[in-house]
Image: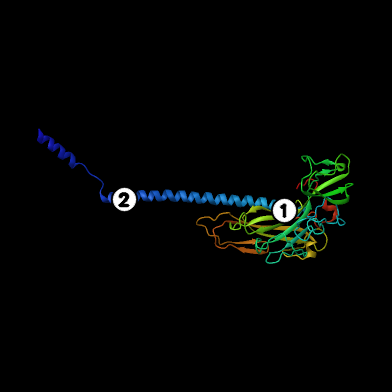
Amino acid sequence: MPMRTNVSRHTLCGSCKGFSLVELMVSILLGSLLSMGMANIYLESKRNFEAESEAAQIQESGRFSLNLLKRELMMAGFYAGMPSVAGLAASPVAVDCAGTTWALDTSVPIDLINEYSLSMVTVNGTELTCLSASEVKPGTDIFSVKRTAGDPTLENGVYHPGVKGAEQTQWYLRIQNYQDLPSWLYVDAGGFDSGDIGVGSKINYWEMYARVFYIRNYSNAMSDGVPALCVERLNGSAMATRCLVEAVEDMQIEFGIDTDSDGVPNQFKQAPTASEMGNAVVARIFLLIRSVNELTGYTNTMAYRLGQKKVKARGDGFLRRVFSATVQMRNATLPVHQRREGVANETS
């Protein structure tokens, strides 16, 4: 009986087999290849997601920036729908962008610095002291716009629908008898004069805007390296900075000059003279917008055309795209009978 037990055990052990070294190495290799494949799929999916997110951000930034700048250029020189405010004297502003009366001087509704390098002097000879030379991105355009809101805050003594009172710390263009006797009023506290409020008062109030648009070489902090579209704007009785869209690398404006007074541009110039600016009827806007973050494994070697200017990428990992639009400057230089058409429904 014991011998039979020993034979049975020997037979069972003889049938047992384990992994050979070769089989083990092959298994490890196959497992490693499978893991690497899964990791590559994950990394590729992550890169695609990041690229799509950055592209969506570029698209949204471009759409918003163009719409904002188009409206400003279209409304440049719109002063309460009046054919002329030539006799309106500028009131001093506590902290202005040039001298003390620049913000409320309506004689130059739009001005330009073409491809800023060292000078903050515009084509009309105005030095914009509200901008810091160290913060403006070299080679980009700077332009200023002056206008009122598209709708009055108070019209014939009645507040505009949705408006309950005057904005505090705001300059207004006050119009008496609808289109006569314009004057400036700064509302600090307390609102409009009580005698101006009431149906049939023949008094209108329009918010006044003075703005300088430019590209700053940083967005939130000087060390972040993200350029941004910013604006110096009349805020209360001083100029204040506000950045609107980050990752805007370049802005170029070309003006369509009307040389024969028919309202149609005969030539486009990126560096017009002061007299040519006075005959500009159309503006072309070009924006170069990049992604906020660099993409892993991507090298940008493309060249971009912004009107007459060509910009080459620096071999970095940022996605870029050019956005452009053409806008008719309805109020800055057009004939009087055209200045007021199509602006009644505009809002600020």
Residue at position x 16%, y 39% from top? 11
Element under disc 1: helix
- Tell me which numbered mark, 2 or 1, is placed earlier along the sequence: 2
Q: Nearer the viewer, residue 239 or 63?
A: 239
> Circle 2 — which element?
helix
Residue 155 percent coordinates (x, y): 84, 43
In the image, residue 16 sits, relative to residue 22, either above or below, namely above
Establish if 227 lies above or below 189.
Answer: below
Name the spot of residue 26 as percent of width and height, x first: 31, 50
Mark identifier at residue 26: 2
Residue drawn at x 56%, y 49% is 53
Residue 117's mark?
Answer: none
**Does 146 sit left or right of 22 as displayed?**
right
Percent coordinates x, y for residue 281 in the rendering? 78, 58
| 206, above or below 140, in the image | above
Identified by mark 2, the residue type is Val
**Mark 2 Cα within 10 Å, few/some/many (few <14, many 20+)?**
few
User: Considering depth in this image, is 166 or 141 the residue closer to the camera?
Assistant: 166
Question: Are there few (<14), some (14-19), or many (20+) residues within 10 Å of tag 1?
Answer: some
Gap in angstroms between the C-alphas marked 2 and 1: 65 Å
Task: Give the number of marks.
Answer: 2
- Dot 1 corresponds to which residue? 70
Q: Horizontal placement of 332 versus 7: left or right?
A: right
